[in-house]
Amino acid sequence: MDELAKLPPTAWALIAGAAVVGFGLSWAWRWYRHYRARKALRAAVTGGASDHLANALVPDGMGGGFHVDYLLLTLRGVVVIDLRDVRGNIFGGDQMAEWTVMDGPRRFTFTNPQGALYDRIAAVKAAAGDVPVEGRIVFTRRGKFPKGLPKWTIMIDALRAEFPPADYESPAESAARFGESWQRLKSAVKPSYMADMR
């Protein structure tokens, strides 16, 4: 202890500087890892789309709006994506009001997301006009459905197989067929203020 008290002020400044640099590097590394993971997740969701919108607020026709994680323009039309990053074993069904998550000793429930997905699909149809609209509740790899997937629920790794990418060598067929409706939808939506609240 006496040895530390005898250190000159420059030594204390060097120690403090090293601590600040170490903290800064640690924070920067964590930020970069989080940024890279989000970028990879976005690429996994949008990989099959010829165009997409993220974190959009779709008008509900009554002065409000529905937050939509992703809107994808695909060969089959527009796809509404409700993205869920839930860790653990998930037990859910079409007729269940709540779905249960078990992650080791932790257990919690969340409202069945299918009803909200139907509302979002209806809002997108109203805003886009004459274009087929589908919806999927997409779960990341951190979740598992040991008893099987409920209707309209899909794991992220299967999303690209269900909605394969267009041939980008030639003008995208989806853009040509649904371009007018897609532009109408893009004009109707706004950036969602709920993006960081989910």
Image (tube, rainbow, N blue to C red):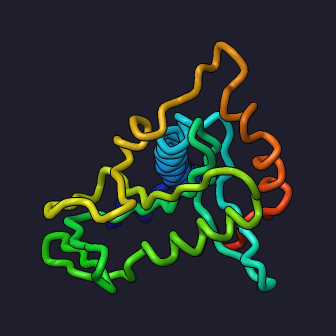
Residue at left offset 47%, top offset 56%: 7
Place of residue 6 in the rendered image (x, y in percent of width and height, measured from the top left)? 44, 60
Which residue is painted at 57% across and 41% down in the image?
A: 76
Where is residue 102 drawn, in percent x and y? Answer: 19, 73
- Disc tally is 0
Indicate whether 134 appears above or below 196.
above
From the viewer's side, name the closer residue of 81 and 141. 81
- Res 15 seen here: no
Above or below, comparing residue 20 to residue 48 in the picture: below
**Frontmost residue, 81 versus 54:** 81
- What's the residue at 36%, 59% (across, down)? 153
Q: Which residue corresponds to the image point at 14% horizontal and 64% vertical from the top-left?
A: 147
In the image: residue 26, left or right of residue 68:
left
Q: Quadrant of residue 150?
A: bottom left
Q: What is the x, y in percent for residue 40?
A: 48, 40
Whether 33 is drawn above or below 190: the answer is above
